[in-house]
Amino acid sequence: MVADCHTHSLFSPDGTQSAREIIETAIEKGLSHIAITDHADLMTPDNFTGVDEKNIGAYISALTALKEEYKGRIYVCVGLEVGYTPQSEQAAKALVSGRYPEYVINSVHYVRGSDCYSKGHFMGQDKLTSYGYYLDAVKQSLNCAYRYDAVGHFGYIERCSPFDDSEMTFKEFSRPITDIFRTIIERGVILEVNTSVSGAPSSSLPSEKLLKIYYDMGGRKIATSSDAHLCRDIGRNFHRIQDMLKKIGFEYLTVKQDGKFKKLKF
């Protein structure tokens, strides 16, 4: 295992571990790079916020102090996971406008006013409709007003999907998936390989099949990401995922270090 580029500390509403505990666990597991990327879900209907304009200073101060303390032992990347919604774009832009956070994950959680991580989100919708709305939101997020370095857990809608066939397949959604991958590649940002897949039919988000399509389209920037909210989940299933990525043809991960993208062999 090399790098975990998506973890959550106590600055997240659903966090259970301190940033120091995350870093110590990452060292114990042999990682050379750990990104702490707490939630910044601004202006959401259920007030699931995390980091916002009131505590961004405290957040960055805490993480940069740890970054300096652990220098030489592990690279601590000061990150943020911004939850995209159309109404929060300008607030998110202000939040990430400085040198820090150095790594911004752009994720879609809320679609048409409700979180996809909820059975209630799907009420009155069939699969093609609900997944279509999600893919439209992801496409819209890629042209957001704020800067970002990675696209988070593409396929998130699968995790609480009530449908018997919950996989987001290329056969069903070839046009939007192609458009999304093309935009990611053209923008030169990272496609996250997220191993928090409880409820999803695949071992990663996006699935192996979709990662193969991304690779065949010329996509090379990927990052292994546990989305860990518990220390035990840091690096979750990375050995298996890295074997899968090698089989597809990927040779390296891409991380953010010292303000630049860096390739890490795995």
Image: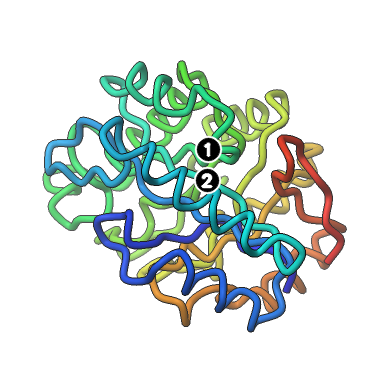
Name which of mark 1 and mark 2 comes first in the sequence: 2
Disc 1 marks which amino acid?
Pro
Tell me if 141 is positioned left or right of 100 in this view: left
Q: What residue type is labelled 2?
A: Gly
Work out whether 18 lies above or below 135. below
Nearer the observer, 209 or 100 = 100
Q: With 135 as the anchor, is 191 left or right in this view?
A: right
Q: Which label number is shown at residue 79?
A: 2
| Quadrant, the C terminus | bottom right
Q: From this viewpoint, is residue 244 visible?
A: no
Pointer 1 and pointer 2: residues touching (CB < 8 Å)?
A: yes
Q: Which residue is drawn at 67% across and 34% down?
A: 189
- Quarter of the view holding residue 133: top left
Quarter assignment of residue 4: bottom right
The image shows residue 61 at horizontal and vertical percentages of 46, 45
**What percent of the width, then of the height, locates residue 25?**
55, 78
SS state under label 2? strand
